[in-house]
Amino acid sequence: MKTPARAILIFIIIFLCCPFCVTPSEIANNAVMRVSITDDVDSVYLALKGRYKIYAAGSENTVKEGPFFSGTVSATRDGLRIGKEDIRVNAVRVRVARDSNIYLNNRRFRGDIDIFRKDNGRLMIINYIGLDKYLYGVLYHEVSHRWPMEVLKAQAIAARTFALYQARQNALKAYDLRSDIYSQVYGGRTSEKWSTTKAVNLTKGKVLSYKGDIFPAYYHATCAGYTEDAFNLWKIDIEPLKGVPCDFCKLSPHYRWMKEIPLSRIEDRLMSAGYKIRGISSFSVLSKNRSGRAERLDINAGNGTSAVLTGKDFRQIIGPNEIRSAKFTVLAVSNKLCLEGLGWGHGVGMCQWGAYGMARKGKKAEEILKYYYPGAEITTIDKVRL
Ligand SMILES: [Zn+2]
């Protein structure tokens, strides 16, 4: 291959691969998280308040720069439209000067932002941000910033461990974490509060480990009596995630819930998930596990069709915020399903309202974490495999 052609090929490979490739060692050295801010959207509103540069992603080629920008970014047939300008590249990196700010859809973000035009002509936005700055934007969404500092510190250590574990698992994927309830809710700089930032700083570098390795340090809002064994949900079989009794979350506003859902909506959701059932006549919990969560559900229809599914799948299909937990009993089935339930969340790992209850009793962050993740140690990032 002649040199110019080879150079072009290398450039194309670097251009295509670089934005997606962060090796585990790079994560260890720089601890940069790749957080998906939004995905599969037609456009985003971008405001750059201060000096900025926009590069073709994976290169140092500046495609746009200036003292200030605000406008819409959308995909074109062969690139991106940034404001009124068409740029013939499929991905750009947005970087602002140290004292400037990036706003995306009116939320303020630290770090760099990459905007990708996907093959389907829609946009994916990824925020590249240092681990602790990422945690600044997570904690506010996970716990009340008015809670005692020991809970905030416990939450910071759990969230840091979870983030690093996800980064390791997703090293070859386009991003490490999503900014919604499926990872950890992340709101960018807009979500930062003094106390939650302090908790991240006070626990700098601290992570949970089990037998010398980090693990997915799941957590949830309220367990209502007993945390869940991660094996029941995701076949993760390690001591820190086997479940413990919790008597500390009784103050939680999510301790008890009632829900009525029209059967027609349940049928629609089940149908779209592949369960062919119409005219539901009965709904029962066949078995519960040690933590009291529904293991198997039996749903019958008058026409003889039926479905048996796990509590986890049912919750996922109907919506995890509609069915707040798999710990429920059926009160009645008419044209609606009436449920009475306990707790909020999948129930695995640290119970946040329980951690709050423990802190109110004077427990320290380390005691809280060792209670909810039995067998785990608190160590520092440099001591674990990333
Ligand atoms: Zn609890």
Image (tube, rainbow, N blue to C red):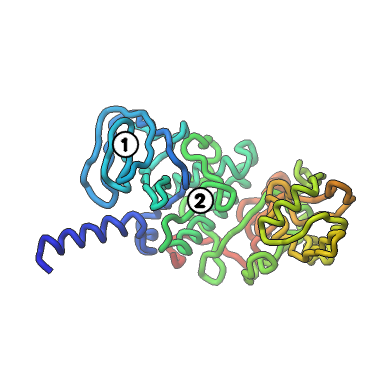
Q: What residue is pinned by disc 2?
A: 178
Question: What is the quadrant of the C terminus in the image?
Answer: bottom left
Q: Nearer the viewer, residue 177 or 100?
A: 177
What residue lies at 45% left-to-right and 63% top-to-bottom?
Answer: 168
Q: Nearer the viewer, residue 347 or 245?
A: 347
Q: Position of residue 276 (x, y in %)?
A: 73, 61
What residue lies at 14% left-to-right and 62% top-to-bottom?
Answer: 5
Indicate the amino acid at tag 1. Val
Decide which of tag 1 and tag 2 comes sooner along the chain.
1
Q: Position of residue 125 (x, y in %)?
A: 42, 45
What residue lies at 32% left-to-right and 35% top-to-bottom?
Answer: 82
**Cα–Cα span, label 1 and label 2:** 23 Å
Q: What residue is pinned by disc 1?
A: 96
**Do we see residue 92 in this rendering?**
no
Mark 2, other Cα within 10 Å: few <14 / some 14–19 / many ≥20: many
Q: Nearer the viewer, residue 35 or 6?
A: 6
Q: Position of residue 45 (x, y in %)?
A: 42, 33
The reply to whether dot 1 and dot 2 touch (C-beta < 8 Å) is no
Secondary structure type for disc 2 = strand
**Do we see residue 341 in this rendering?**
yes
Mark 1 against mark 2, which lies toward the viewer?
A: 2
Q: Position of residue 193 (x, y in %)?
A: 53, 35
What residue lies at 44% left-to-right and 44% top-to-bottom?
Answer: 133
Q: Is residue 2 left or right of residue 160?
A: left
In the rendered image of this protein, does residue 46 appear above or below residue 259? above
Mark 1, other Cα within 10 Å: few <14 / some 14–19 / many ≥20: many
Indicate the amino acid at tag 2. Arg
